[in-house]
Amino acid sequence: MKKIYNYFLAAGVFVMANMGSVFAAENNGACALIQSLTPVIKTLRTLAFIGAAFVLMDWAWGFIKDGKAEKEQLKDKGIGMFVGFFILFGVGMLLQFVGSEGGKDYLGCVVTALQ
């Protein structure tokens, strides 16, 4: 687990170090990338929300099938499922924001028609 955490930490540091070039004064490249990847963003967003629903469904079905919920089961299984749900849901919300008009406006990609 610690090895995976180190990989995510290194990837996060790399992304944050290069974010300045994305939010530069002329970010036509980022806008063109978002525009060209709109179908992919919508598909990944949908899959993230569906994945979050399946994680929650699996968690609930495990307790329904057993017929009882003990404190040890909640600690062992519940926390991981809960974290997995929120990670998938967060990814879905982030992709929803990037693909929306508000996200494009935040990135400076929205061009108004009548100025």
Image: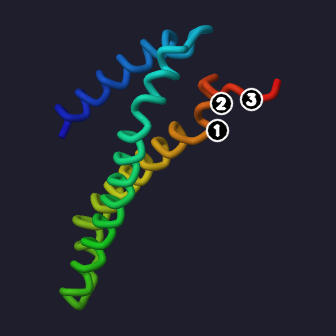
* Up-down relation of residue 97 to residue 46 (above or below): above
Residue under pointer 1:
102
| Relative to 90, 104 lies left or right | right
Residue under pointer 3:
113
Alpha carbon of mark 2 to alpha carbon of mark 1: how far? 5 Å
Please tell me how crowded label 1 is: few (under 14), some (14-19), or many (20+) other residues with Cα within 10 Å: some
Furthest residue toward right: 115
For image coordinates 48% across by 21% down, the residue present is 32
Residue under pointer 2:
105
Give amino acid for label 1. Answer: Gly
Q: The C terminus appears in which quarter of the rendering? A: top right
Count of numbered tags: 3
Q: Are marks 2 and 1 in contact (CB under 8 Å)?
A: yes
Give amino acid for label 3. Answer: Ala
Please tell me how crowded label 3 is: few (under 14), some (14-19), or many (20+) other residues with Cα within 10 Å: few
In the depicted view, which residue is nearer to us: 97 or 59? 97
